[in-house]
């Protein structure tokens, strides 16, 4: 088990006169890393929240740093899962101890690891800063805005339906991760032109490992809780009671393409178990903020087709991006494309856009991958997906897999089964439309 020590956050101004927070992360062998949090825009918000919200954000940031610090392959107990013991500094030990088990379950579910958590007394304070007047108005909700297609649809739906109300956008980026900040910077000015004066945004907050004695872990599973922690700070500081994370039900459920891929799914930010467990933790901490995903029962294709302002969506959709492998272009047929075209986020996107004019560019086609042996690694996702589509799954089999994959609310189970079934149809229809004979035969369509 990796025993991790988390220091109290230290604040200072960097050479550019920007406030940063630094958290030192050490393991039991003396190796360390330094987690850097850009506080220049966030500091006024952090000064406006309760100690419990402050602690939740610091914990969520620390978890992200720990996840990136401990390389998975060399520290796993089964090829994937790591055992991690960590002691977090918090301001109210009684409150946090009441939700210790919930937090351990949440982190284990999000990252696929085994977390053991304890707490110690925290007394630190941050430098004072005043919230900008832009953020003192009334906001209907806080929306997470990643720059992906789902978050764009969530933004457009709200802005079109609520012309007299305002939304606050919040986002995070890691400078070592390609893409998200650039996507946000492309989309936000266009949304401002289409829906002027209807939103404010907190400039994307950078959280990253500034220094590390060890090779960094390349997966980003813990990004989910960091997103949620940031949104919570934004919501409470602006006295906004609701957080919206727009994401299609397919990705939320993260239904595994095979039993061997249950623990290796890329993200679980809006999985029902995550939303329910976060809500439970907040309730025990007396945090009265709601968190929800209004698209939990929709496929990605349904989000596109049912968008309230489809014309505006289609006019800027090219600038959204959900590709998970933009940093790996060596084997792309089209090197300057926007998306790789063959990771599962790209596949879901293409299947969702199959009935509209998609001006996005893709580095590869699924037809390029088979049966070319040197592209076996690139073809792993597609190969699993095609084998998954070739199977005949009934509702009972889907229900059982959803339960194994963490769905606890059985009252919603039949609706989740519907999402999985309709997603399979979307994927089959896309393969039927674009696949060559080899690909179609492999998917049995």
Image: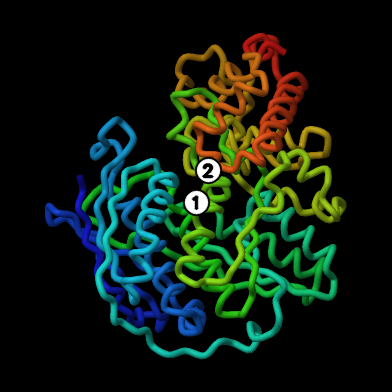
Mark 2 crowdedness (10 Å alpha carbons): few <14, some 14-19, many ≥20: some
Depth check: 103 or 347 in front? 103
**Residue 240, image x and y in percent?**
64, 75
Could you tell me which quadrant the C terminus lies in?
Answer: top right
Q: Which residue is mark 1?
A: 178
Instruction: Determine the residue positioned at 29% across, 30% down.
Output: 78
How many numbered discs?
2
Write down the quadrant of residue 57 in the picture.
Answer: bottom left
User: Regarding mark 2 in the picture, which secondary structure is present there?
Assistant: loop
Depth check: 201 or 142 in front? 142
Query: Does residue 163 sit above or below 345 in this rendering?
Result: below
Could you tell me which quadrant the N terminus lies in?
Answer: top left
Write down the quadrant of residue 165 in the picture.
Answer: bottom right
**Residue 256, image x and y in percent?**
53, 29
Instruction: Determine the residue positioned at 50% across, 54% down.
Output: 277
Mark 1 crowdedness (10 Å alpha carbons): few <14, some 14-19, many ≥20: some
**Residue 275, image x and y in percent?**
56, 53
Query: Does residue 399 sit above or below 389 in this rendering?
Result: below
**Residue 51, image x and y in percent?**
41, 78
Q: Which residue is mark 2?
A: 326
Depth check: 17 or 42 in front? 42
- In the image, taking residue 282 as reference, residue 249 lies left or right, namely right
Question: Gap between marks 1 and 2, in whole Å?
Answer: 7 Å
């Amino acid at each position: 088990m990796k025993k991790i020590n988390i220091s109290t956050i230290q604040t200072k101004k960097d050479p550019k006169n920007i406030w940063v927070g630094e958290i030192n992360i050490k393991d039991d062998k003396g190796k360390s890393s330094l987690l850097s949090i850009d506080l220049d825009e966030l500091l006024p918000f952090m000064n406006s929240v309760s100690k419990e919200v402050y602690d939740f954000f610091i914990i969520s940031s620390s978890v992200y740093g720990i996840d990136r610090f401990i390389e998975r392959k060399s520290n796993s107990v089964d090829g994937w899962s790591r055992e991690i013991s960590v002691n977090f500094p918090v301001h109210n030990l009684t409150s946090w101890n009441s939700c210790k088990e919930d937090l351990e379950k949440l982190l284990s579910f999000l990252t696929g690891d085994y977390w053991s958590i304890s707490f110690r007394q925290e007394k630190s304070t941050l430098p004072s800063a005043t919230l900008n007047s832009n953020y003192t108005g009334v906001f209907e909700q806080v929306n997470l805005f990643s720059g992906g297609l789902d978050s764009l649809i969530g933004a457009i739906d709200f802005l079109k339906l609520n012309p007299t109300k305002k939304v606050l956008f919040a986002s995070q980026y890691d400078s070592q991760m390609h893409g998200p900040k650039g996507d946000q910077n492309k989309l936000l000015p266009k949304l401002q032109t289409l829906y002027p004066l209807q939103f404010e945004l907190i400039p994307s907050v950078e959280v990253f490992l500034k220094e590390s004695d060890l090779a960094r872990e390349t997966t980003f599973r813990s990004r989910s809780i960091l997103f949620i922690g940031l949104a919570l700070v934004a919501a409470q500081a602006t006295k906004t009671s609701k957080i919206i994370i727009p994401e299609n039900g397919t990705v939320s459920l993260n239904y595994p393409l095979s039993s061997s891929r249950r623990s290796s799914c890329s993200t679980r930010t809006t999985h029902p178990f995550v939303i329910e467990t976060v809500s439970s933790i907040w309730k025990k901490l007396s945090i009265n903020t709601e968190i929800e995903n209004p698209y939990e029962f929709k496929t990605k294709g349904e989000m596109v087709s049912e968008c309230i302002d489809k014309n505006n969506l289609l006019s800027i959709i090219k600038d959204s991006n959900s590709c998970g492998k933009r940093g790996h272009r060596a084997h792309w047929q089209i090197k300057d494309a926007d998306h790789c075209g063959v990771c599962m986020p790209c596949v879901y996107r293409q299947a969702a856009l199959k009935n509209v004019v998609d001006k996005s560019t893709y580095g590869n086609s699924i037809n390029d991958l088979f049966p070319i042996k040197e592209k076996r690694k690139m073809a792993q996702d597609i190969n699993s997906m095609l084998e998954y589509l070739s199977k005949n799954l009934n509702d009972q089999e889907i229900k059982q897999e959803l339960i194994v994959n963490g769905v606890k609310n059985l009252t919603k189970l039949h609706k989740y089964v519907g999402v999985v079934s309709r997603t399979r149809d979307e994927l089959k229809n896309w393969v039927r439309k674009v696949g060559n004979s080899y690909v179609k035969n492999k998917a049995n369509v």
